[in-house]
Image (spheres, helix red, strand yellow):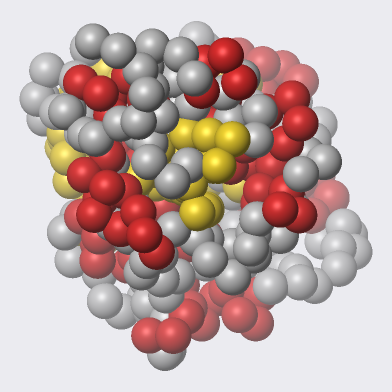
Amino acid sequence: MLIFRQLFDSQSSTYTYLLGDARRGAAILIDPVFEQARRDAALLRELGFTLKATLDTHVHADHVTGAWLMKRQTDSAIALSAESGATGADRYLAHGDRVTFGDRWLQVRATPGHTRGCLTFVADDESMAFTGDCLLIRGSGRTDFQQGDPRAMYRSVKSQILSLPPSCLLYPAHDYRGLTVTSVAEERTFNPRLGGEIGEADFVGYMNNLGLPHPKLIDIAVPANLRCGRPEQDAAVPADPAWAPLTFTFAGIWEIPPDALEERAAQLQIVDVRDREEFNGPLGRIRGATLIPLSEFSNRTGELAPDRPVVAVCRSGARSAQAVVMLQKAGFKDVANLAGGMLRWRTEGHRIEGGRE
């Protein structure tokens, strides 16, 4: 069974794609974003996948790739085009290559035009393809920098992408309008730059007169991506919280396990967000916890010291996760949720006040 997820980075309006072989537990990421590495690693962990490789469709100009950072965290291989000019990859891909993950694989198709090193990745059953910035939804990538060539792009799209089965779904590297997917049949018919009877000369004239502004991050993104996303200084790598062994979830919340909380309780602020009846009820409470019901929380965050880590607690971890979000919006930096709440705390035999067997 193929597991597929489309992930979005709002800063750059770019998509990252996870494909995994559920039976083998092997996955790949296409076009990861540096700032989203924690999110992507959390999703892989929660779905039970081992990341085999990161693939970049091209050397991006709008964001820094997360390839190097994901390799640092998961020991995954870095793969991109042999024509990219990038250093630091584990595998340089050429037209016709295959990238395998478990029993599944992607076919590599060279689709230069947006850049010289653009690739399109086609699923083994040709049900979907990942077009990077070559073919976009009702559009195409620009061709005015990074060895861009409108004639090459026209030929790439016609021969390598629109030649796929009409039902093949096409997933681009970005979309500024929030559109997520198209198909070969749609783009053959409706793409205003490349569909219908539009010829190569029509396309070249269109692309040469776009007059687009210079990409805002090109001078940062391209040099970094030519190093496969490796920062020039280690200080640029986002550091994990040091005050406790925390786990980042795909929901965007840091969590602390019960044993770590019990060991460090004296140094932390523990805030219980249940109702008063629950706080004094049969589940009991953690020794030293302060009661601030979630219904009162937004008006009482000032009762907590902003310079000490805060752990939020509730029955199961759901309400306290919301409290973590509220604390972050209020400016608190070191905040975590008790994983599993009081239910897990009691199940694992940690000390409580009050409550009953």
Between residues 194 and 290, which one lies in front from this camera angle? 290
For image coordinates 65% across by 55% down, the residue present is 304
x, y percentage for residue 112? Answer: 49, 56
* Horizontal side, residue 251 vs residue 81: left or right: right
How many numbered circles are shown? 0
Between residues 196 and 170, which one lies in front from this camera angle? 170
x, y percentage for residue 90? Answer: 18, 66
x, y percentage for residue 53? Answer: 23, 50
x, y percentage for residue 173? Answer: 56, 44
Q: Looking at the rendering, in which quadrant would you find the C terminus?
A: top left
Q: Residue furthest bottom?
A: 233
For image coordinates 17% across by 28% down, the residue present is 348
For image coordinates 66% across by 28% down, the residue present is 293
Q: Looking at the rendering, in which quadrant would you find the N terminus?
A: top left
For image coordinates 84% across by 50% down, the residue present is 206
**Vertical side of 246 occupied by 126: above or below:** above
Between residues 158 and 62, which one lies in front from this camera angle? 62
* Horizontal side, residue 236 vs residue 243: left or right: right
**Vertical side of 330 occupied by 98: above or below:** above
